[in-house]
Image (cartoon, rainbow, N blue to C red):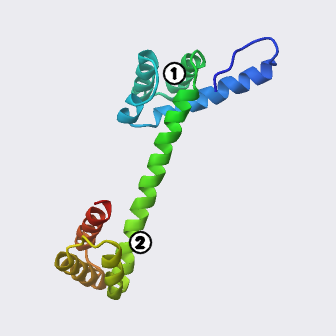
Amino acid sequence: MNTNFNEEISKTQLKKIAKDIEDFGYKLTLLTDEQIQGLNLTDDIKEAIYEYKKIKSNSAKKRHRQYLGKLLRDIDLSLVNEDYQRIQNQSLIAKQAFHAIENWREQLIQDESKLKDFIDIYPKTDIQKCRTLLKNAIKESQRDQTKKAQRLFFKYLREVIET
């Protein structure tokens, strides 16, 4: 993403590159503080990101976003982009794992006989605890009650799958 601004590039192209870098800077502001710390950025850029998060006024945000873009144009963004892509991939993997656990929960609540399949895939399952939590979740879903038992069952499934 780093580009040397020279005479060979048209003014329109320069503006587009600057806008792309500014947009990338905005994407960085959407990360958590922990994720920002893991990026290969200078302290002043990290500070500018944190400042952006504190600003409430839209016009001030726009100005600060442009300032952040200006700071980012002065560094090589290839390593930062790699770090950002790694973070995005981790987020995607976490979402997929969450959906897989949700899917198991729904399948087991709808068809208790699939518990054997689950245990075959995850042999470290505490069968008695799993059956108890599953029965409670099934009862709860039949009565259209609050989802407390289903949440507990989900938490247990997540523990089993992640270990």
- Report x, y in % for residue 34: 35, 34
Give the labeled residue for mark 1.
64
Name the mark on residue 103.
2
Q: Is residue 21 above or below residue 162?
A: above
For the residue pair 85 and 163, the one nearer the viewer reads as: 163
Q: Residues within 10 Å of mark 1 (few under 14, many from 20)?
A: some
Q: Amino acid at mark 2?
A: Asn
Residue at (23% x, 68% y) in the render: 152
- Report x, y in % for residue 3: 68, 20
Q: Is residue 27 visible?
A: no
Q: Is residue 33 above or below residue 73?
A: below
Instruction: Assign the N terminus to one quadrant of the image.
Output: top right
For the residue pair 49 and 125, the one nearer the viewer reads as: 125
Q: Amino acid at mark 1?
A: His
Name the mark on residue 80.
none
**Marker count (numbered):** 2
- Report x, y in % for residue 145: 26, 77
Q: Which element type, helix, strand or loop, lies under badge 2?
A: helix
CA distance separating discs 1 and 2: 42 Å
